[in-house]
Image: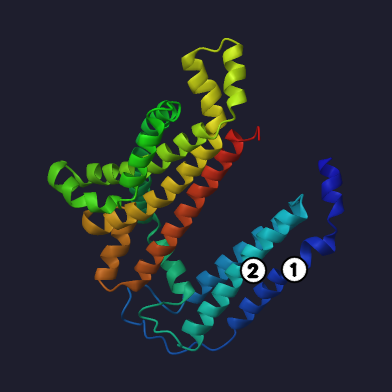
Amino acid sequence: MNTTNIAKLSLKTRLLRVSHLLFALFLLTQILPQAMSKLRGKTDLPVADAPLYAIVFIAAVEVILIAVSLLARKKETLTLFCDIIAFVYILFIAWTLATAKFNVIREQLFPPPGVVLRQFVEDASPLLGHIGASLLLIARGFALALVTAIPLGLVFGSSARFGSAAGMVSKFIGSIPPVVYIPYGIALLPTFKTVSAMVIFLASFWPIFGGTMSGVMLIDRTIINSARALGVGRVSMLFHVTLNAALPQIMLGASQALTVSFILLTSAEMIAARNGLGFYVKNYSDLGNYTKTIVGVIAIGIVISLVFLVFNRIQKFLLRWR
């Protein structure tokens, strides 16, 4: 079946794409004369060889695109990937023209792509350390929210008496921005890492708790009655029947919690942290090094995209029965 799917895509369909034309257009922009750079003497990196980094990066992207085009099994998947790469090419073309070629945008605030990519290479080691620190904080707070919010949501959602009251309380407390707890956390907790973990926990707990309760309340009662008729006990009912049936809503709440957690983590790291991606961006923006500031912003976007890619894979696996 896989062989049949591959055969359906002709070589023309695979390789005759607008994205490849945009790659050629990007290379043509590199032929244009460079504008007089205003970054000379204002950055610790050489500016002259910066375009080479952009060319190498885009060439690597094109190689990946060709490989995916030749190996893709579905036309829809190939089209989506080509559209994403086309957007990247358009961004780099516009970025290059507006900065390195015509100086439409001030280079001091928005350096050319080659300069930013070179900074990525130079800062690879410290960036990995900051990424690790941020992911560790997210993992601690989010994992704690999962192991507490899901069981509590199952219990309260299964109770006709307490379910409505718990739902109202969760909506009220969940509507309070967790960032307001940061000053209290700094005053009461011993370290900033503990404060950050607490804020992420509070940001994650209520969406997961609310999603779990909502999932339990939406379960078709015939499923519960059938399980009871088969002699399923209360604990097994809660964690094998109810949990599985409520899983779609739980994953929806977890997705919302993860989004809010990253926003709050970055904000919290900008306030008082000494490491992490938020600290990296805030520190270099205060120092006026906008090349490293943009590197940090792009790194945040890449990390969040990869985390959600993994999360969506896990969600697809857990909900494969749907």
In the rendered image, is residue 274 in sight?
no
- Which residue in the structure is indicated by mark 1? 17
Q: Position of residue 167 (x, y in %)?
A: 39, 38
C-alpha distance separating marks 1 and 2: 9 Å
Residue 70 as seen in the image, left or right of residue 106 = right
Q: Position of residue 192 (x, y in %)?
A: 21, 47
Q: Quadrant of the C terminus?
A: top right
- Residue drawn at (46%, 77%) of the image: 112
> Judging from the image, what secondary structure is the residue with disc 2 in?
helix
Q: Quadrant of the N terminus?
A: top right
User: Image quadrant of residue 118?
Assistant: bottom left
Q: Are marks 1 and 2 in contact (CB under 8 Å)?
A: yes
- Residue drawn at (51%, 86%) of the image: 101
In the rendered image, is residue 113 in sight?
yes
Instruction: Say few, some or many: other residues with alpha carbon within 10 Å of mark 2 (under 14 / 14 to 19 / 20 or more).
Output: some
Along the viewing direction, whichever of 37 and 109 lies nearer the viewer: 109
Along the viewing direction, whichever of 232 and 229 lies nearer the viewer: 229
- Which residue in the structure is indicated by mark 2? 86
- Residue drawn at (40%, 57%) of the image: 124
